[in-house]
Image: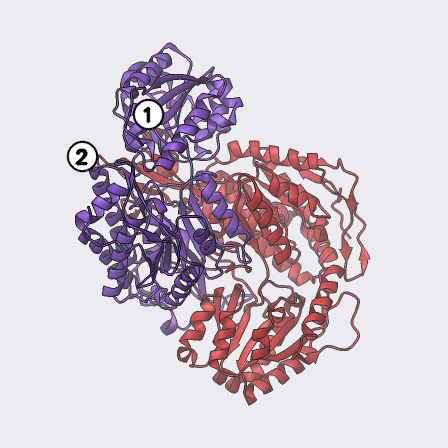
Chain colours: A red, B purple
Amino acid sequence: MTTTAITGKNYIGNKLSSKGNKTYTTFNPQLNKENDSIFFEATINEVNEAIELAHNAFKEYRNYPGSKKAVFLNAIADEILNLGDDLIHMYMSESGLPEGRAIGERGRTVFQLRSFAELVTEGSWVKATIDTAIPDREPLPKSDIRKFNIPLGPVVVFGASNFPLAYSTAGGDTAAALAAGCPVVVKSHPMHAGTGELIASAISKAADKTGMPNGVFSNLNSGGIEVGQQLVSHPKVKAVGFTGSIKGGRALFDLAAKREEPIPVFAEMGSINPVIMFPKALENRGENLASTYANSITLGTGQFCTNPGLILGLKSDSLTKFINSLAQKIVAINPSCMLHPNIVAAYESNKAKAIAQEGTAVVGEYSKETQTNYASQVITTVEGKTFLENPTLHQEVFGPYSIVVQCENIEQLEQIISNLEGQLTGTVIADNEAANYPKVIAALQNRVGRIIFNGVPTGVEVCPSMVHGGPYPASTDSRFTAVGVNSINRWVRPFSFQDFPNELLPNELKNENPLQILRSVNGSFTKQEIK
Amino acid sequence: MTTTAITGKNYIGNKLSSKGNKTYTTFNPQLNKENDSIFFEATINEVNEAIELAHNAFKEYRNYPGSKKAVFLNAIADEILNLGDDLIHMYMSESGLPEGRAIGERGRTVFQLRSFAELVTEGSWVKATIDTAIPDREPLPKSDIRKFNIPLGPVVVFGASNFPLAYSTAGGDTAAALAAGCPVVVKSHPMHAGTGELIASAISKAADKTGMPNGVFSNLNSGGIEVGQQLVSHPKVKAVGFTGSIKGGRALFDLAAKREEPIPVFAEMGSINPVIMFPKALENRGENLASTYANSITLGTGQFCTNPGLILGLKSDSLTKFINSLAQKIVAINPSCMLHPNIVAAYESNKAKAIAQEGTAVVGEYSKETQTNYASQVITTVEGKTFLENPTLHQEVFGPYSIVVQCENIEQLEQIISNLEGQLTGTVIADNEAANYPKVIAALQNRVGRIIFNGVPTGVEVCPSMVHGGPYPASTDSRFTAVGVNSINRWVRPFSFQDFPNELLPNELKNENPLQILRSVNGSFTKQEIK
């Protein structure tokens, strides 16, 4: 279907390379057959070569002004758009996702790249903080100290299965790391290696056109886990970004923690995204809520990190009505394709495991025959006590599945929330009643990264106020977000100059403030120069 | 010497407790004898009790307004000052440090507490970031999203041996955590358990007077490693602060990483703080530099994290002269007391190991007899090549010891710096010549958290622009500082509200901006209300 030739090779800096013998292909879940292109898994030498190049590129790239990095980021966005329909068709053939989603996700990817370009052009993101000298302070003179954020070094990014564009090769992690001044080595996701190669070709072209140092970006193919392990273990890699399963993210986190020099791993992993339906809302608009949630649960075949997998309510007639209505509405939705047969298999097995738990009742299940690799959506329900006592029911079933928990009372509801693992989001559905449940909302806040009021958790806005992350295992470090421009903070560290001559300071910290950035000077935010 | 009675008991919240049988004493290194008080090691039940109390206290304390936390922090500072000479005498008897240092460190401790009180009273530290709704945005409406920083939960603080006040019971880690809204459980340092108990009594009194929830603070005695291990492993502990050895910090980091829910450990560990002496400076003022560095190396008996343990220069007559002068000046300084016989023993053994390395020459060594527990200062020198090839020479010798490396040329100097482990600080000594060595300075920047120009690394200013931390093993997470008000960022995470009703939002995020804090609203910093 594509006209841009896929080579199946790795990008080691600006060179195409295929030194290994291990190969693999991607799969078209809609057609239920393998795609044509053959991908060459990176060898250990290719991994090392990519990291050495990144290490050397870092020496130059870390010092580039924001304006120069912005030109690169915008060029990547341009080159991605230049791929045109080839990219959209490749995306669809490797993900089973529809065209509208492909175009939307490409838009998000381009938007993210341009947002980071804007951020580093403006420049205040480095958080310049200046305390000027007080030479006559008693008992000791005070030095002039100036701090700003500098990049950590080469970053390894693991592409996500469920976002072939926005959280993969040129996705949020890559854009944030490049903006920070960190070269990036991507471990391409094996399910969409062709999409990855197209994007890598765009980045490589952009790097070449804008004069970036060779090695600022590499893209490594990998069908197994070895390449990822080698990348995370390499002493010259300084940080890791990952989006995927708890098992995968935790394995990388453990590997990074065991290194002689441990490095930060920001892994955005599983979440069941609890939704609390308070009584009045259920009573007033249970039917509407059932429609809204039937759609949210099945959106993207339930393959979003923020998919609502757990709905909590107080036992009542209106909750029963809501459950039945949700069940009816969800089975009326046409099933859609999942990303890969392996994802379908995992969905079926996790779903079966959840349904088999004692006390779990299936209330709605799409039971007509579906196309191969399409997911049949399911709604189950349990008693609060059953849920509380069985941690298996707290596990994510990745796909269009949700469990409704019928709580005895508000105390049990609060107890259930307090006992949940960390989550990306929590949602509160309430009609002028939320103020009556401060403890429930406080407990929810303590378990999640974002609370949504009277909405759905799916649909993550890319903006500075967004938090996408949360207590473990939603992410491995809740102190950072993976979405929005503040995600750049994952890849930088603060650095101080003490009594440094003005002419040798970086522009961000010079007296004259030549970049006209907002700085904290002796405790006040200002763009003024220092006299 | 003290009049405030020392009980030797643990503070489990506001209760004194001594359920265990294991006891220990502290040691007066100046008098070379045990102090009188007997301390009761916390039992596993006492550890659990302290954490349960902290967990429960968190539910309330996390929601306290900044003004209320500030009253508590200032009350702690007041109560510390109220301890008067008892505290100073206890400090001296448990550390061997002189009165001036004790008083200075108490001043720093009080200053830190009051700085955090000021920070949370002002309130803008929560980094409120608001993106208002765009209901008519196409293709989808934009939600109202508002983010700010919230506390992680109970924090465990390990007191430092070398700062019985400023980085121990009520030191920087504790002050930052309490300011953030996190209850604190301190693992008291066994070398100064009496000082720890006095400070704990002050905190307990302050908590009581200002109406803090019981469990907001506990102080656990511990002569071994078990209490620390139990604390770091406990599921209800959410973060750890540590100042000490690489071995100790790494063990805790590893333990925290292995937990079912891994938690952040900010460990500030070893550093040899390289100092580069460029040729002109050595030629112009080698003699003065020798005096300055003889003092810096022996300051506080060389027991500062930022002690200059490594001096680098280019082989030349002026370097040789500097080395001889440094050797002469340092042996003319009167030795002083170390913190504890164990610290003396470690110093002697690490020093002997360093001196025994092939190619190491001792150029200055205090050789007269000293009082027991006093450290004899030493200066050694090696060739650049020898240093480069022998990692043992890169290890910290905690105490008044420094090695001068004579480099063949500037390339070797740069290579040595690039091959160093991560450091807290690097120092550049230069006379109008630093601009000639951009690669050396860039390499240094990549290995340290702070660069000092024409000064000494000892003396860490407490101010917002300070970075105390650095690439591993200087600290376990270079993305944070342990000194200055920004150290509060170690104990908080960002949290978003989406479409939340204004009246239910915390004051920091309400439209009216009732706290009058600086907020980022739709990309601009402002204190204005949102209309």
Question: A338 or B114, which lies in front?
Answer: B114
Which kind of residue does numbered mark 2 sit on? Asp
Given this view, does label 2 or label 1 mark the residue nearer the observer? Answer: 1
Of the 4 image quadrants, the one containing the C terminus of chain A is top left
In the displayed orientation, state which residue is furthest to the top.
B317
Q: Residues within 10 Å of mark 1 (few under 14, many from 20)?
A: many
Query: Horizontally, is B187 left or right of A430 in the view?
Result: left
Question: A478 or B333, which lies in front?
Answer: B333
* Residue name at image x 52 percent, y 35 percent: A61
Which kind of residue does numbered mark 1 sit on? Ser
Which of the numbered marks, if any, corresponds to residue B376? Answer: 1
Q: CA distance from mark 2 to mark 1?
A: 34 Å
Query: Horizontally, is A471 left or right of A215 in the view?
Result: left
x%, y% of residue B143?
48, 67
Question: B140 or B6, which lies in front?
Answer: B6
Pinpoint the chain carrying mark 1: B
x%, y% of residue A298?
65, 71
Q: Residues within 10 Å of mark 2 (few under 14, many from 20)?
A: few
- Is the residue at mark 2 from the same chain as the one at mark 1? no
Residue at the disc numbered 2:
A136
x%, y% of residue A137?
19, 37
* Image: A454 above or below B418: below
x%, y% of residue B414?
48, 24
Tag 1 secondary structure: loop
Pinpoint the chain carrying mark 2: A
Is residue A170 visible to the viewer in this orientation of the structure?
no
